[in-house]
Image: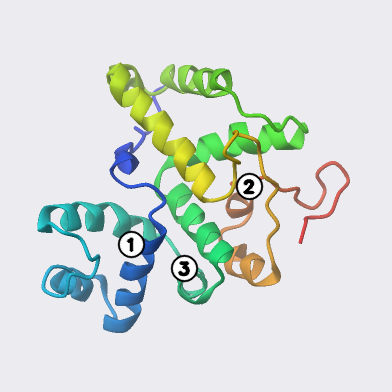
């Protein structure tokens, strides 16, 4: 059985906190993504030097933001720096199953085993395992494979899931974040290295 193909376009933009916030705030101001698109270039919403770059980033980031609920968007716009990163990580994992699978099957599983160092072998094993079920992974070039890995690890660090040395950082979610993410539970929580109620006899952190 071949699974649904992975969407791998995330190499076009990292976590992109500042640009994501610009688009999210424009959406709140103008009321629709269509209105944001109309004003993207005339108002230079993304403050980019070329129109082509702005269009490319807009096309990559908006579908991520569209996966967030109203509560999650509000927290992204109004929240603290860390809350904003967490909401963007949620958006990224919602949009790209490849990233979500890595977060749940590698990062979180290692965290639950108290194995906090993420290695090159961990990623290679994950990629090879997924390639058995996803033909699109077998067809990409080695340079694209490297780009996917580099961008994924950069996002993990930007979201403060991994340290600069690829060590897992435990996520502490506050009450506002838990409430905002409850609609998507339990997967919304499983993309973070934390313990859910009933796991290892521990209560969820926070």
Task: Decide if residue 13 is in sight here.
Answer: yes
Quarter of the image for the N terminus: give it: top left
Q: Earlier in the sequence, mark 2 or mark 3?
A: 3
Label 1 element class: helix
Determine the residue positioned at 34% across, 30% down.
147
Residues packed near mark 2 inside 10 Å, few (<14), some (14 to 19) or many (20 plus): some
Residues packed near mark 1 inside 10 Å, few (<14), some (14 to 19) or many (20 plus): some
Measured in 3D between alpha carbons, the distance from the residue under mark 1 to the one under mark 3, in whole angstroms, is: 19 Å
**Could you tell me residue 145's position as x and y percent?**
35, 23
CB-based contact (under 8 Å), mark 1 and mark 3: no
Quarter of the image for the C terminus: give it: bottom right
Label 3 element class: loop
Q: Earlier in the sequence, mark 1 or mark 2?
A: 1
**Could you tell me residue 29's position as x and y percent?**
31, 83
**Could you tell me residue 60's position as x and y percent?**
28, 51
Determine the residue positioned at 58% across, 69% down.
180
Q: In the image, is residue 6 above or below residue 1?
A: below
Q: In the image, is residue 51 above or below residue 129?
A: below
Q: In the image, is residue 55 above or below residue 38?
A: above
The residue labelled by disc 2 is 190
Determine the residue positioned at 59% across, 39% down.
104
Measured in 3D between alpha carbons, the distance from the residue under mark 1 to the one under mark 2, in whole angstroms, is: 26 Å
As drawn, the label of residue 19 is 1
The residue labelled by disc 3 is 69
CB-based contact (under 8 Å), mark 2 and mark 3: no
Task: Decide if residue 66 is in sight here.
Answer: no
In this view, the mark in front (1 or 2) = 1
Determine the residue positioned at 44% across, 16% down.
132
Label 2 element class: helix
Measured in 3D between alpha carbons, the distance from the residue under mark 2 to the one under mark 3, in whole angstroms, is: 17 Å
Frontmost residue, 123 versus 184: 123
């Amino acid at each position: 059985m071949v699974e649904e193909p992975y969407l791998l376009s995330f190499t076009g933009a990292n976590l992109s906190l500042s640009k994501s916030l610009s688009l999210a705030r424009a959406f709140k101001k103008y009321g629709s993504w269509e209105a944001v698109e109309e004003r993207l270039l005339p108002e230079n919403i993304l403050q980019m030097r070329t129109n082509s770059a702005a269009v490319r980033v807009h096309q990559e980031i908006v579908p991520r933001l569209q996966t967030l609920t109203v509560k999650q968007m509000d927290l992204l716009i109004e929240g603290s720096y860390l809350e904003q990163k967490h909401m963007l990580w949620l958006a990224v994992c919602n949009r790209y199953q490849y990233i979500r699978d890595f977060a749940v099957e590698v990062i979180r599983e290692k965290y639950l085993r108290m194995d906090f160092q993420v290695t090159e072998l961990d990623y290679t094993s994950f990629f090879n395992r997924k390639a058995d079920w996803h033909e699109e992974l077998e067809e990409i070039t080695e340079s694209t494979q490297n780009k996917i890995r580099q961008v994924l690890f950069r996002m993990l660090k930007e979201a403060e899931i991994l340290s600069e040395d690829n060590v897992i950082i435990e996520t502490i979610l506050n009450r506002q974040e838990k409430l905002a993410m409850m609609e998507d539970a339990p997967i919304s929580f499983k993309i973070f290295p934390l313990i859910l109620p009933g796991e290892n006899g521990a209560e969820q952190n926070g």
